[in-house]
Amino acid sequence: GTLVSVMQEFASRGLNLTHIESRPTRIALGTYVFLLDLQGHRSDAPVVEALTATEAQSEWLRVLGSYPRWTPSEA
């Protein structure tokens, strides 16, 4: 269903999902919230496109954080 459709939005843009977690909502039995971690920054064009497409398919979408990638040279 919807989760596969959302995952395809990221995959079709070459974005890797690194973590998927489902949590039941307290709204109704059988309804879930999905938490996704991905490689990319929310300002990257492919991420913006995937989030926009996902938002159109979702009741709501919230970005909890977006951080620069750490590289060993920054240590």
Image (cartoon, rainbow, N blue to C red):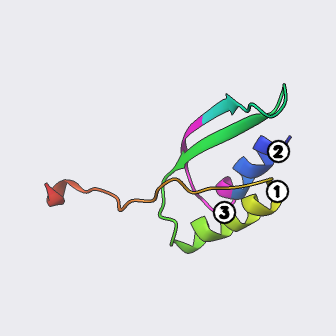
Q: What residue sits right under mark 3 in the picture?
A: 51
**Dot 3: few (<14), some (14–19), or many (≥20) neighbours within 10 Å?**
some
Q: What residue sits right under mark 2 in the picture?
A: 2
Most foreground residue, 66 or 8: 66
Q: What residue sits right under mark 1 in the picture?
A: 57
Q: Residue at x 66, y 32 (%)?
A: 22
Query: Residue 29 placed where, x, y %?
Result: 84, 25
Left or right for 6, reference 11: right
Marks 1/3 in contact by CB < 8 Å: the verdict is no
Q: CA distance from mark 1 to mark 3?
A: 10 Å
Q: Amino acid at mark 3?
A: Leu
First-in-chain label (1 vs 3): 3
Give the quarter of the image for residue 60: bottom right
Q: Amino acid at mark 2?
A: Thr
Give the quarter of the image for residue 66: bottom left
Most foreground residue, 59 or 22: 59
First-in-chain label (1 vs 2): 2
What number of labels is visible? 3
First-in-chain label (3 vs 2): 2
Left or right for 47, reference 25: left
Q: Residue at x 68, y 55 (%)?
A: 61
Q: Residue at x 66, y 62 (%)?
A: 51
Query: Residue 55 placed where, x, y %?
Result: 74, 61
Marks 1/2 in contact by CB < 8 Å: the verdict is yes
Numbered range of the magenta stretch: 10-20
Q: CA distance from mark 3 to mark 2?
A: 14 Å
Q: Amino acid at mark 1?
A: Gln
Query: Residue 47 placed where, x, y %?
Result: 58, 65
Is residue 13 one of those drawn in magenta?
A: yes
Above-or-below relation of 19 to 5: above
Query: Residue 42 placed where, x, y %?
Result: 52, 66
Above-or-below relation of 52 to 2: below
